[in-house]
Image (tube, grey):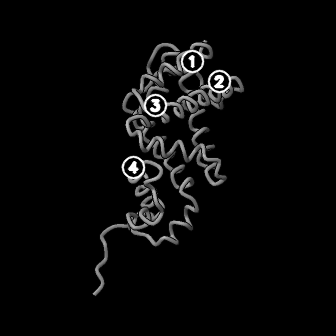
Amino acid sequence: MVIRRAGPLPDRADAIVDAALALAEEGGFDHVRQREVAALAGVALRTLYRKFPTKEELLATGLVRVGDELERRLLRRPLRERTAAGRLTRLFDEMSAVLCEKPKLAQAIVRAMASGVPGTAGAVLAHMQRGVALVTAALRGRSARGGDPTADEIEIALILLRVWFASIVGWCAVPRHASFMTECMAPAIRRLAR
């Protein structure tokens, strides 16, 4: 007799990412071992390697989850500050909070992003594009026009995102209060959000 599960089986890639992120949250980058990820996800080790050839590629996909959580936060509490600087400060505070609330996971994801492993490039670029869209929206505010970002908006967004990334790398080296990130971002926001 065969017993069938009710409902669809979870996507294997999602189960693998969930397992990896849970292990990273528990013990950081070094705690994520492919054999343990596969066992926790309930997949064969060869399935894991077929979908994610390296640990860095696997953890870099965590950026999608980070972006999803950020967007959920912004839906619950939209950026309504009156100035571009206020909206940008709040946006980067939220971006930082998503990572800083789980320091070991943040360290693992940032280490994967900065690894230089070629397979991480897609996830990093997609995250940057998502970031550019969020920064552009914060620059424009509610009443501003939509459409594609201008060259100036893209340049401002990329500069701010790079400053934020450098700051989160510094935060990961010595985790501290999330206000550290606000202090790091303040000068760049002041200069660029005029």
Give, as a three-letter code, the residue at label 2: Ile
N-terminal-most mark, 3 or 1: 3
Does 62 sit above or below residue 92?
A: below
Q: What is the CA distance from the residue labelled 3 to the residue labelled 2?
A: 18 Å
Q: What is the CA distance from the residue labelled 1 to the residue labelled 2?
A: 9 Å
Q: What element does badge 1 sit on?
A: helix
Q: Which residue is mark 2?
A: 156
Indicate the position of residue 132 as horizontal and vertical percent values. 60, 32
Q: Circles 4 and 3: CB distance less than 8 Å?
A: no
Indicate the position of residue 14 as horizontal and vertical percent values. 45, 58
Q: Give the foreground label among 4 and 3.
A: 4
Other-residue count near label 4 (Cα within 10 Å), few / some / many at <14 / 14–19 / ≥20: some
Judge from the rendering whether residue 56 lies leftward or rightward of residue 96; answer left or right: right
Give the residue furthest to the right.
151
N-terminal-most mark, 3 or 2: 3
Q: Circles 3 and 2: CB distance less than 8 Å?
A: no
Give me the disc on residue 189: 1
Give me the disc on residue 96: 3
